[in-house]
Image: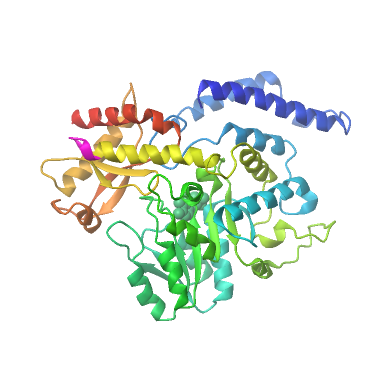
Amino acid sequence: MNIHQAASLRTWLDRVVTNHERWAERFGVHPVHPSARVSDETVETVLDELAERLGGNYPFFHPRYAGQMLKPPHPAAVAGYLAAMLINPNNHALDSGAATAAMEREIVGMLAEMFGYGTHLGHLTSSGTIANLEALYVAREIHPERGVAFSTESHYTHARMCHLLGMRARPVPVDGSGRMDVTALEDLLRTGEIGTVVVTPGTTGLGVIDPVDEVVALKRHYDFRVHVDAAYGGFFTLIAGDHGIDPAPWQAIRHCESIVVDPHKHGLQPYGCGAVLFADPSVGRFYLHDSPYTYFTSDELHLGEISLECSRPGATAAALWLTFKLLPLTRKGLGAVLAAGRRAALRWSGLLEQSECLDRYQAPDLDIVTYFPRTTPFALSQIDRAAHRLMRRGMDAQDDPVYVSVLRADASAFASRHPDVAVDTDGARVVRSVLMKPESETFLDTLHARIEQLVKAG
Ligand SMILES: *Cc1c(COP(=O)(O)O)cnc(C)c1O
């Protein structure tokens, strides 16, 4: 967080606490029980100890951190979360979280609209993994005898969740850029064994967009569901058609049966915020349950009745609601935040192509850039060592550190992108940077120069 944002946050948090006090006073002032009382002085000491321990983290907030998919939430999300957390509503039931449940329904409606869904059913989850679990659970109830197909580049948790659900998992190979091979998928569909295909518009490793439109087109010939795992990529639909992002896969999402998107990735939220959406609201029937504990004061649908999880923080909904009020789901709202990262990725891709000491691994589809140090000889074992060395050098530097991550590419994947490489081992680590902070755009030249300097230093 930069200084300007920190100052704003301090003001906003003050307002949140004041508003909360005002609300609480309506019920009369009541003293805290002595058992729960702690002294200001003790808290301050322990807070400093906590800061000390947290100090070991990498600076995810700073554009010099260009590694994994990590950044702090927007200060608006922090303020929204705190405001609701001070009350601590539970979005499991309306009695325990009526106000935040209403916000959750509004947010889910906005997300559904963003993807072009009309009628829908959906809710927030604690993560993308749980959201995908719910989508696959519904898929199993609809096609109990049939399996799930997903590409070898899709998120590793799909196989785990299929195992948990007792569903057969069928990996689909990818093409030379990491996209699901639709011909191979069609061969699988011909067997009649596949009930659900998972497509990923924005894979977690390379940020590659599966051909959602081509998979959807196959529905004319075969009977199967399509689940869209847009945990990482989903919000890029706001800027599809711009910055070299092909709109076709994004426009096809509306014709898919379910969607997962993670507001805790590109939606500026703290961890604990995924979402699942279904096109057909009648899938709610698969969630029916009887809770002997939950009290009901209304006949309205409770979000707890359409969720596998029980307790869920109302604060998550409040944080997201406040964020979308300030940065709406439009091209100019949240879209502008994603566009900055996308522009940075495109520009960096160009700089990497011209670089004497670096080369890009493949052109970025979204905001993930992959690259590697050029080595002599140009061999996988050399590249692997140089990529790892670059990562270590960057993070260990006392002055001017930079933080990148590495991704393992197997030999055939590497050679399909760079046929002149000497395959002297089974793969190589390449460098991976997720440019998910808009500040990466203004920091890009500094970042690129620093990385070149580290590579040249050998
Ligand atoms: C991050 C991610 C997941 C898992 O989501 P979590 O919120 O980390 O559980 C699933 N699929 C894709 C494509 C992802 O990028």
Residue 280 is left or right of residue 359, and the answer is right
Residue at x-position 53% and y-position 39%: 332
Residue 268 picture location, percent across and down: 54, 40
Is residue 122 shown above or below 53? below
The residue positioned 71% from the left and 57% from the top of the image is 303
Q: Who's the residue at 39% across and 55% down the image?
A: 209
* Coloring applied to the structure: rainbow
Location of residue 17 (image quadrant): top right
Asked if residue 173 lies in the magenta stretch, the reply is no
Residue, far bottom? 191
Spot occupied by residue 2 in the image (x, y as percentages of width and height): 50, 24
In the rendered image, which quarter contains the C terminus?
Answer: top left
Q: Nearer the viewer, residue 45 or 352?
A: 352
Look at the image and give the residue range highlighted in magenta. 353-358
Foreground residue among 304 and 235: 235
Give the quarter of the image for residue 87. Answer: top right
Residue at image x 59%, y 38%? 327
Which of 261/324 is in front? 324
Q: Is residue 282 visible?
A: yes
- Percent across and percent down for residue 424 are 14, 53
For this view, does 146 lie left or right of residue 351?
Answer: right
Indicate whether 134 appears above or below 397: below
The answer to which quarter of the image holds residue 199 is: bottom left
294 lies above or below 437: below
Residue 280 in percent (x, y) is at 62, 67
